[in-house]
């Protein structure tokens, strides 16, 4: 009977360890996903800024060309 109690205790501790590990892993994956989303958002913002700058420069060039023509 003592062996049954001992093995039940070991299985309970192992199960608790596994459950805690899964929750920690889930949090890390969610953290990683949020980080990737932030990086994508920053890249999109930088690309938009580059397009705005390029568009502004091209408009200035177009204005100079039309004035000189």
Image (tube, rainbow, N blue to C red):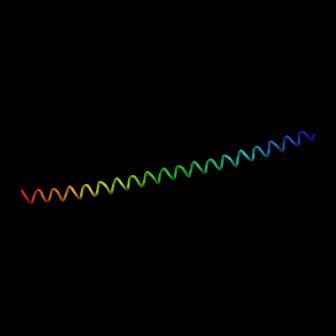
Q: In this view, does 25 lie to the left or right of 54?
A: right
Q: How many labels does the image show?
A: 0
Please state the horizontal and vertical placement of residue 55, each as a whole percent of the image: 24, 55
Residue 50 higher or lower than 17, as above or below: below
Residue at 43 percent of width and 51 percent of height: 40
Please state the horizontal and vertical placement of residue 58, each as a whole percent of the image: 20, 55
Please state the horizontal and vertical placement of residue 46, each as a whole percent of the image: 36, 55
Q: In the depicted view, which residue is nearer to us: 53 or 37?
A: 53
Q: In this view, does 67 lie to the left or right of 39?
A: left
Residue at 9 percent of width and 60 percent of height: 67
The answer to which image quadrant residue 54 occupies is bottom left
Please state the horizontal and vertical placement of residue 26, each as a whole percent of the image: 61, 48
Residue at 45 percent of width and 52 percent of height: 39
Q: In this view, does 44 lie to the left or right of 6?
A: left
Q: Is residue 52 left or right of residue 67?
A: right
- Quadrant in which the C terminus appears: bottom left
Residue furthest out toward the right = 1
- Quadrant in which the N terminus appears: top right
């Amino acid at each position: 009977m003592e062996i049954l109690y001992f093995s039940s205790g070991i299985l309970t501790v192992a199960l608790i360890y596994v459950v805690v590990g899964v929750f920690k892993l889930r949090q890390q994956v969610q953290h990683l996903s949020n980080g990737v989303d932030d990086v994508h958002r920053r890249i999109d913002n930088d690309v938009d800024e580059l397009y705005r700058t390029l568009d502004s420069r091209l408009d200035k060039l177009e204005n100079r060309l039309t004035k000189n023509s």
